[in-house]
């Protein structure tokens, strides 16, 4: 989320973030930002200090006070570059602070650093676990360095399961996430594709990483350390 009332600067921020494959939402004032945050949970807020209606400092303080919002990282963006201003920003709960003018390269470096610290993965960062790696940019899967050939549906299933390793997904949840809510598919279809996924992943041997939970669903489980 970009919270910036100067349209040209908001457009610069939007352009550079989207050029790095981020989805963006631009809002123009502090009160609107809090209203949108009540509906959506962005991975990051780039927040201008000087805003109409409600200042960026007040928005940041509100984010940190609300349990459902406090985990969202915030980068403060401001023309105020004095030390006491930076301290005010950090005291309000900002994770980082960029003074205007700034370069797009500096902005993106700080965005990536804050997301890494907060544990948010970038869109194309590989998914890994149990010797399995999904290259999200090239849509390739490897296990222990050996490429695994998967059909599109099995690839999507594996991606969903690995994104939340250890979580048990019901058949209905997997149908929604892989096939989509608007498509009717029999729940047992999930079982067929799970069997195909297992066969492909285990073709070269190794532990079965996909656990069947009776009457509940499936999960991708990492092997216990030896």
Image (cartoon, rainbow, N blue to C red):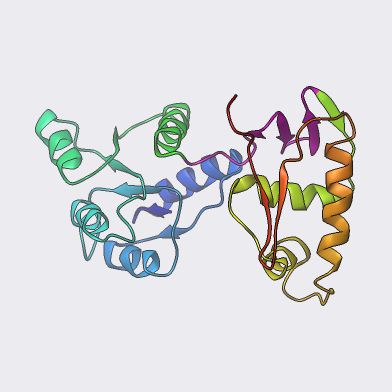
Residue 212: in sight, yes or no? Answer: yes
Residue 27 falls inside the magenta stretch: no
* 75 up-or-down from 224: above or below: below
Q: Position of residue 115 (x, y in %)?
A: 44, 38
Residue at the spot x=88%, y=60% of the render? 192
Does residue 28 appear to the left or right of 53 in the view shown? right
Does residue 160 appear to the left or right of 45 in the view shown? right
For the C terminus, give its image quadrant. Answer: top right
* 3 up-or-down from 207: above or below: below
Q: Position of residue 197 (x, y in %)?
A: 84, 47
* Residue 73: quarter of image: top left
Who is closer to the viewer here, 223 or 103? 223
* 83 up-or-down from 159: above or below: above
Residue 153: in sight, yes or no? Answer: no
Does residue 201 appear to the left or right of 93 in the view shown? right
Residue 133 falls inside the magenta stretch: yes
For the N terminus, give its image quadrant. Answer: bottom left
Does residue 141 appear to the left or right of 93 in the view shown? right
* Number of marks in picture: 0
Q: Position of residue 209 (x, y in %)?
A: 72, 41
Residue at the spot x=38%, y=64% of the render? 37
Who is closer to the viewer here, 109 or 78? 109
Residue at the spot x=89%, y=50% of the render? 196
Q: Position of residue 165 (x, y in %)?
A: 60, 45
Which residue is at the far left?
A: 84
Who is closer to the viewer here, 172 or 223? 223
Q: Which residues are magenta?
A: 120-145
* Residue 207: quarter of image: top right
């Amino acid at each position: 989320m970009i919270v910036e009332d100067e349209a040209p600067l908001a457009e610069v921020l939007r352009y550079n973030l989207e050029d790095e494959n981020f989805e963006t939402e631009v809002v123009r004032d502090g009160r609107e930002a809090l209203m949108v945050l009540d509906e959506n949970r962005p991975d990051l807020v780039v927040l201008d200090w000087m805003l109409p209606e409600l200042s960026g400092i007040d928005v940041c303080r509100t984010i940190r006070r609300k349990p459902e919002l406090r985990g969202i990282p915030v980068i403060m963006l401001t023309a105020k570059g004095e030390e006491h201003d930076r301290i005010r920003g950090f005291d309000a709960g900002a994770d980082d602070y960029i003074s205007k003018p700034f370069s797009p390269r500096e902005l993106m470096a700080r965005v990536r650093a804050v997301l890494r610290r907060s544990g948010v993965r970038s869109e194309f960062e590989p998914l890994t676990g149990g010797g399995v790696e999904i290259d999200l940019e090239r849509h390739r899967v490897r296990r222990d360095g050996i490429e695994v050939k998967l059909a599109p549906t099995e690839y999507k299933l594996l991606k969903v399961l690995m994104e939340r390793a250890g979580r048990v997904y019901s058949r209905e949840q997997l149908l929604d996430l892989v096939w989509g809510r608007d498509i009717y598919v029999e729940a047992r279809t999930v079982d067929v594709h799970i069997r195909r996924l297992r066969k492909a992943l285990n073709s070269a041997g190794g532990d079965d990483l996909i656990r069947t939970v009776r009457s509940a669903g499936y999960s991708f489980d990492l092997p216990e350390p030896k």
